[in-house]
């Protein structure tokens, strides 16, 4: 599905998670004529592609959730914000060096600092849970559901209080959408 149009007043995606391809995002947020004056979008997109290639060479990546100013009408965003969904079993089977690469992606601003890419990343370890159990029955399940809910809620929020000040309850309601890009099956 293509990227939905941005809201004409707020410049944000409509509320919800919207499935699309990387090509759809590039067309909508890099190649589109409305961003022809951007001095940052093409370079950020190139950094995004490098980050995806590195992470995919290290662990199975099922999907990515993209949000923030890159997925808005902002002409010159500073970076692209993404939560990668990786296979938890595959991650745990990797070497310590490979796990370290994934941990760089799991910590805010580390891809920027360690690799010099304008990609702010986070990671959710996807767990194969055939039947959800009550909270507390499985540590992996609890962590997975907590992280998935946390990031879904986060990408729907829009900060309305000034940057640098503590968030308030006005920052909590869902007000924008985000994009989901699939990379591999959940098998």
Image (tube, grey):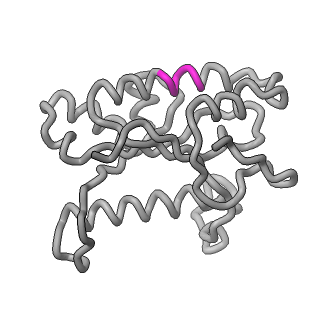
28 with respect to 118 (left or right): right
Name which quarter of the figure residue 30 lies in: top right
Q: How many marks?
A: 0
x and y percentages locating residue 5 in the rendered image = 77, 47
- Which residue is rendered at x = 71% and y = 51% of the image? 13
Q: Position of residue 54 (x, y in %)?
A: 36, 24
Q: Is residue 112 left or right of residue 32?
A: left
Residue 56, relative to residue 82: is it above or below?
Answer: above
Answer with the quarter of the image where residue 76 lies: top right
> Front-most of 81 and 64?
64
Which range of residues does the magenta coloring cover?
Answer: 45-49
For the residue pair 22 and 151, the one nearer the viewer reads as: 22
Q: Which image quarter holds the N terminus?
A: top right
> Residue 22 location, x and y as percent?
56, 32
> At 58% across and 55% down in the image, what residue appears?
17
Examine the rendering and report whether any part of residue 108 can be seen.
no
x and y, in percent, of residue 82 in the image: 50, 42
Q: Is residue 154 magenta?
A: no
- For residue 176, say whether it is visible: yes
Is residue 179 rendered to the left or right of residue 60?
right
Compared to 175, does 105 lie above or below? above
In this view, the residue farthest toward the right is 9
Residue at the image point whose x is 32% and y is 35% from the top: 104
Quarter of the rendering containing residue 162? bottom right
């Amino acid at each position: 599905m293509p990227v939905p149009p941005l809201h004409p007043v707020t410049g944000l995606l409509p509320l919800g998670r919207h499935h699309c391809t990387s090509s759809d995002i590039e067309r909508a947020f890099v190649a589109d004529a409305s961003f022809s004056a951007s001095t940052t979008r093409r370079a950020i997109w190139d950094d995004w592609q490098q980050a995806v290639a590195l992470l995919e060479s290290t662990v199975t990546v099922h999907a990515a959730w993209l949000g923030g100013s890159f997925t808005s009408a902002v002409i010159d965003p500073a970076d692209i914000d993404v939560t990668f969904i990786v296979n938890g079993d595959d991650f745990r089977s990797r070497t310590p060096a490979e796990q370290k690469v994934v941990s760089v992606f799991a910590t805010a601003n580390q891809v920027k600092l360690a690799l010099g890419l304008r990609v702010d990343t986070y990671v959710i370890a996807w767990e194969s849970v055939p039947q959800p159990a009550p909270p507390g029955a499985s540590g992996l399940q609890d962590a997975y559901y907590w992280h998935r809910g946390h990031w879904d809620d986060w990408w729907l929020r829009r900060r309305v209080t000034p940057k640098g000040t503590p968030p308030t309850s006005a920052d909590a309601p869902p007000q924008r959408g985000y994009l989901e890009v699939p990379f591999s099956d959940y098998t």
